[in-house]
Amino acid sequence: MQSRATTVVSYLAELPPERKAALQAILKVIRKNIDPAFKEGMQYGMIAWFVPHKLYPAGYHCDPKQPLPFAGLASQKNYMSLYMGCLYTDGSELARLQKNWLATGKKLNMGKCCIRFKKLDELPLDVIGEAFARIKVDRFIADYELSKPQKAVKKK
């Protein structure tokens, strides 16, 4: 179930203590490492980082009213999730994260762009911080432009 919280503070206030502490620790790492041009807020019922419309007026191709999503952090029913769709615009970033993660000896439970975990100690926070530090907003926009689906041209 998606949260109806409208702020990060109110989202965290809804959580049980153990999950709140885990997400706060991850937030600290992300905030320390993320390019400040990305904005933090709520998007799609979770804590999110996105490219504001002032930097990318076209918005998200699926819903141009939404700013371009970069990453998200959520408490789900059976686990917590770190959404890193930002890794998929450049395949080298995904490969680097996977390699660095596995080198720590920790198990990587990853779906399409979602890293699932139940406890904070399952995550190598330094690897997550490095991934966020590497992707700057200008590069992310350029990679997104190259990878986003193109509209079909109607033939007359």
Image (spheres, rainbow, N blue to C red):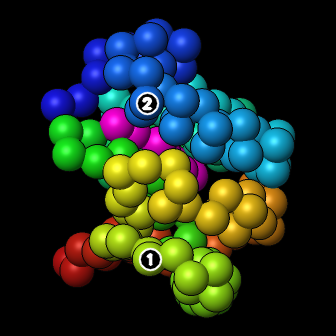
- Where does residue 117 sit, x and y in percent of width and height? 38, 56
All told, the count of numbered labels is 2
Instruction: Using the image, determine if residue 106 lies above or below residue 23.
Output: below
Asked whether 111 or 35 is in front, the reply is 111
List x then y, in percent, for residue 101.
60, 78
Image quarter (top left, top right, bottom left or bottom right) of the C terminus: bottom left
Image quadrant assignment for residue 116: bottom left
**Residue picked out by circle 2:** 18
Q: Position of residue 45 (x, y in %)?
A: 33, 29
Q: According to the image, label 1 marks what residue? A: 107
**Between 4 and 27, the one nearer to me in the picture:** 27
* Amino acid beneath label 1: Lys
Left or right of 118 on screen, residue 67? right
- Assess whether residue 72 is covered by the magenta stretch: yes
Q: Considering the image in quadrants, where does the N terminus appear?
A: top left
Q: What kind of residue is marked 2?
A: Glu
Residue drawn at point x = 81 percent, y = 50 percent: 33
Picture quadrant where residue 145 is located: bottom right
SS for dot 2: helix
Q: Classify 10 Å Cα crowding around label 2: few (below 14), some (14-19), many (20 and above).
A: few
Residue positioned 42% across, 32% down in the render: 19
Q: Residues within 10 Å of mark 1 (few under 14, many from 20)?
A: few
Helix, strand or loop at label 1? It is: loop
CA separation, marks 2 and 1?
20 Å
The magenta segment is: 69-75
